[in-house]
Amino acid sequence: MNLDIFSSLTYSQAQAQEDSVLERARERGRELGVESVGASTANLLTVLATISGARNMVEIGTGVGVSGTSFLRGAGKQAALTTIDIDVDHLAAAREAFREAGVDGSRTRVISGRAQDVLPRLTDGAYDLVFIDADKDHLTEYATQAIRLVRIGGLIIMHDAFDQHRVAKPAVRRPSTVATRNATRLLREDERFSTTLIPTGLGLQLAARIS
């Protein structure tokens, strides 16, 4: 990597700031073995929620509430988040993060279950923002469901779009890497979406529905 680019990326990462609520959420994540979105990514999620004007959001993969808290802080007091995770300990940690952040309980719908079972029950075109940060085994299915769920003008965000920085290496054919490439291609080649890849943290694939 060009040293100037590396220096700029390092500098931008260092500018990210977090409060004690997210710091405690990350500590709970470390205890549970959960890798949350990085601080700079969390900051960006808050900004994206703000500028998108999202009111109804879906999160596939709750983690310990770092990303969900970031979205809820940016989206405004009338916004609601539906978040899905199969691990009840993760969901409990996320609820604690939401509570510490002062989020009204009526703004969150925390669902325990497999996303591939829950997502088909959600309403077509009813969501302003869909965030994907879950197991790679079903990533293409999650992307397909996200396309169905998001309204025109809405936004799909896929975290770890570099698959731990393996996607850009053509020789790497790990199942997770192939799944990430396929999900990214699915979004990029859908003419109803305008897409871009942002090199923040582990990478964010953005897809804005334009038609």
Image (tube, grey):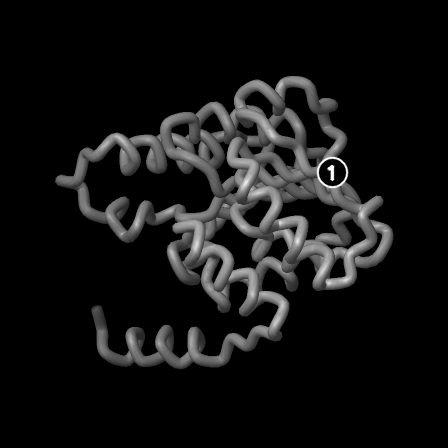
Which quadrant of the structure image shows residue 44?
bottom right
Residue 171 in percent (x, y) is at: 13, 40
Relative vertical location of residue 11 with respect to residue 96 in this rendering, above or below: below
Answer with left or right where residue 79 lies relative to residue 119.
right
Image-quadrant location for residue 175: top left
Depth order, front residue of 26/192:
26
Tell me residue 204's x, y (percent): 46, 52
Judging by the rendered image, the residue that carries numbered circle 1 is 109
Q: Is residue 26 left or right of residue 6?
A: right
Residue 153 in sight from this viewpoint: no
Query: Going 42% across and 32% down the picture, which residue do you hit?
Result: 183
**Quarter of the N terminus within the rendering:** bottom left
Q: Quadrant of the C terminus?
A: top right
Residue drawn 56% across the image and 61% down it:
25
Q: Nearer the viewer, residue 71 or 185?
A: 71
Q: Quadrant of residue 200?
A: bottom left
Say how many tags the image has: 1
- Give the residue at x 63% y 25%: 148
Q: Position of residue 63 (x, y in %)?
A: 52, 47
Q: Is residue 62 visible?
A: yes
Considering depth in this image, is 16 or 9 the residue closer to the camera? 16
- Residue 145 vertical position relative to residue 52 in the rendered view, above or below: above
- Residue 46 horizontal side relative to residue 108, left or right: left
Residue 197 drawn above or below residue 43:
above
Q: Is residue 13 above or below residue 145?
A: below
Q: Mark 1: which amino acid?
A: Arg
Q: Residue at x 42, y 58 (%)?
A: 30
Structural crowding at the residue carrying mark 1, measured as other residues with C-alpha within 10 Å and reported as few (<14), some (14–19) or many (≥20): some
Q: Secondary structure at mark 1?
A: strand
Please provide percent x and percent y for residue 38: 46, 62
